[in-house]
Image: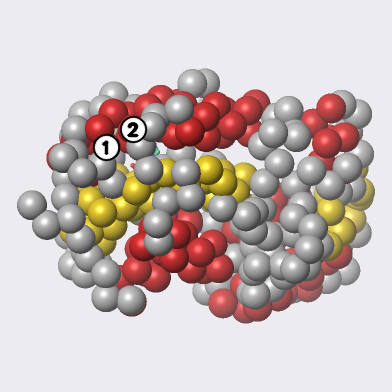
Amino acid sequence: MDQDRIVVTGGTGVLGRAVVARLSTEGRAVRVVSRRPRPGSGAEAYEWATADLRSGVGAVEALRGARAVVHCASGFRRGEEEALARTVVAAAREAETPPHLVYVSIVGVDRIPFGYYQAKLAAEQVFAASGLPYTVQRATQFHDLLRALFAFSAKAPLAPVPALRFQPIDVRDVAARLGELALAAPVDGRAPDIGGPRVRDARELARVYLLATGRGRRPLLPVAVPGRVFGAFRAGGNLVPGEPYGRIGFEEYLGSVAEPRSAAYHR
Ligand SMILES: NC(=O)c1ccc[n+]([C@@H]2O[C@H](COP(=O)([O-])OP(=O)(O)OC[C@H]3O[C@@H](n4cnc5c(N)ncnc54)[C@H](OP(=O)(O)O)[C@@H]3O)[C@@H](O)[C@H]2O)c1
């Protein structure tokens, strides 16, 4: 069987859609994996596999003929992130030539003791222990996540904003890196972390968001929370020092979003 295609798990998600768009534009054969059936229209440019990576139903077929798997599917429930990783590894083992597994993680998962981040670290370890060709790519927070956070905060008359710094990255920049990695030889470890073009105070980013959505005069309430998670963020555990990878800034991102008022995140 030809092993040309790049399988994108979570190809319906915020990052996955950008990865699929990027690879399709480059003329690659792409297969989206989702729990949902193929939509009636809008998905003609790529293959589609319906699979549940938690239960494993459909996973082997979903990965069949894959040269690489960009694993963007993710779950927040307890044990879910690791379970999805285990399913991807088990399905990849079934292939005659196992595909290159590219896993998307988050900068600082080993420094910030937040439950979801600990689950990401455990999933990284599933790939590392698999003996299969793999690459882990950690990225900083996506612009979409901060937009969703600020959209939520902006509902209050005094918009609460965490007293933290972020280095948000655009999913199109992350997709560019993941596309390159999928086609390259596996690192069998971590590729260098990637972050957005600038480290910025959350208050500054919130102000940019409020201005872009016509609420520039809304007062902000910087919030500091005691505890180890907040402390680790405050210490810069979520940042990537050195030359930034991402090129698209928060203003440019907001300008490219059709309806900046609506949050991209369903959660
Ligand atoms: N958000 C950030 O700031 C950030 C930063 C760095 C890294 N990351 C990482 O980037 C990755 C993508 O994040 P995202 O924000 O794009 O996620 P998202 O929009 O929430 O998408 C999650 C995807 O997971 C799929 N999925 C969930 N459970 C599944 C299951 N049981 N079987 C098959 N597919 C399943 C969903 O597909 P269906 O619903 O179609 O089944 C959906 O496409 C995650 O690993 C995340 O940790 C995120």
Q: Residue at x 68, y 60 (%)?
A: 195
Circle 2 sits on which residue?
A: 89
Q: Is residue 128 left or right of residue 6?
A: right
Q: Is residue 5 above or below residue 120?
A: below
Q: Give the image location of residue 216, x and y in percent.
A: 83, 71
**Distance between the alpha carbons at the discs numbered 2 and 1:** 5 Å
Q: Is residue 116 above or below residue 201?
A: above
Q: Residue at x 51, y 64 (%)?
A: 177
Give the crowd class for mark 2: few <14, some 14-19, many >=20 residues within 10 Å: many
**Secondary structure under the numbered disc 1 in the rendered image:** helix
Q: Is residue 176 above or below residue 99?
A: below
Asked if one can make out residue 160 in the rendered structure from this viewpoint, the answer is no
Q: Residue at x 84, y 53 (%)?
A: 165
- Asked if the residue under mark 1 is in contact with the one under mark 2, i.e. CB atoms within 8 Å, the reply is yes
Q: Residue 17 shows which numbered tag?
A: none
Q: Is residue 49 left or right of residue 261?
A: left
**Secondary structure under the numbered disc 2 in the rendered image:** helix
Q: Give the image location of residue 183, x and y in percent.
A: 36, 62
- Give the amino acid at mark 2: Val
Circle 1 sits on which residue?
A: 92
